[in-house]
Amino acid sequence: MMIDDLPYRQVGEPKPGGIVCVVDHATNFVPEDIELGISADLLEQHIALDIGVEGIAGRMARRHDIPAHLATVSRLVCDMHREENHKNVVPTESDGHLIPGNIGADLEARLERLHRPYHKALGEWLDAAQPELIISLHSFTPSLATSDEERPWEVALLYNNDDRAARHAIRLFSDHRLNVGDNQPYSGKELNATMNRHAEAHGRAYIALEIRQDLIVTRAEQSRWAAMITDVANRVALAME
């Protein structure tokens, strides 16, 4: 839900030089004045949000002192994890599902109302905090409707040009006996918009995480992952000092 019509909310207070979390696809909320033209059940699926990550980020903020910046609108309304000129910043289809309400939508209006304020606030938040490490938190569906590709990874690290933190994180998650993806199931060379803009462009270290959604459905699972991610992030930060 948007509060004060803002496309983001922030949980916790960053400590200068600390660790922070960014969640571009936290919610499936659709403003009342935007009609996507899809069935309600699709809003509960991976095309509308990154299932499980809002709960993880909230627990990391409240229990582990890692503040979070979260989007408050569905990725189907405006995808914060895309550049402004990306064809899917306001998607007209996703995983084989047509989004008819977005066909012919006023792209500039969506960007001005949602995308730009989200990234402006995120940029200011990060400038003030100057974090030693950013966690970019996402989740992925175990299977796509439009593909037969197996997705066995339990967690994955994405990166573009800067893999400093990712390399440490891959090793540390592997120590938990997890099947860890290296730029899987998506490549950060192609999909890394938020971290390209707010981390790599400023020389900030980051770990972009993708967690398989069937592992983070319940509160207990989200609590477990929040604790594990916090431990890994703290150890990555120490390794990079």
Image: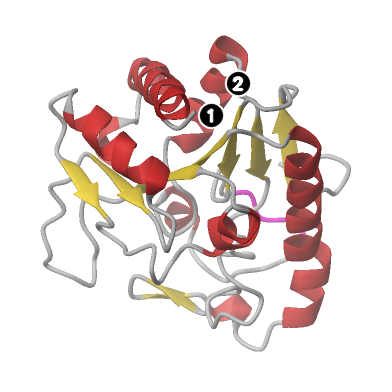
**Residue in front for this viewpoint, 42 or 200:** 200
Provide residue 227's location: percent of width, then percent of height.
40, 16
Residue placed at 59% from the left, 55% from the top? Answer: 74
Q: Which residue is mark 2?
A: 61
Residue 166, image quadrant: top left
Q: In this rendering, does residue 33 appear at all?
A: no
Residue sitting at 49 percent across and 53 percent down? 43
Would you call the spot at circle 1 few (<14 residues within 10 Å), some (14-19), or many (20 or more)? many
- Mark 2, other Cα within 10 Å: few <14 / some 14–19 / many ≥20: many
Q: Secondary structure at mark 1?
A: helix
Kindly identify the amino acid type of the residue bearing the numbered disc 1.
Ala
Q: Residue, x 12% and y 26% (percent of image)?
A: 177
Please provide percent x and percent y for residue 39: 48, 62
Q: Amino acid at mark 2?
A: Ala
Q: Is residue 70 left or right of residue 218?
A: right
Farthest-out residue, bottom = 104
- In the picture, measured across the screen, residue 188 lies left or right of residue 4, that is left
Asked whether 31 falls inside the magenta stretch, the response is yes
- For the stretch drawn in magenta, the main secondary structure is loop
Residue at x 67%, y 38% (from the top left corner): 69
Q: Distance from label 1 to label 2 (Cα)?
A: 6 Å
Q: Marks 2 and 1: in contact by CB < 8 Å? A: yes
* Rendered view: 143 above or below 14: below
Q: Which region of the structure is painted magenta? A: 29-33
In x, y percent, where is residue 59? 53, 19
From the viewer's perspective, is 224 left or right of 181?
A: right
Which of the two residues, 101 or 39, is positioned nearer the viewer here? Answer: 101
- Position of residue 64 relative to residue 148, above or below, is above
Q: Which residue is labeled 1 in the image?
A: 57
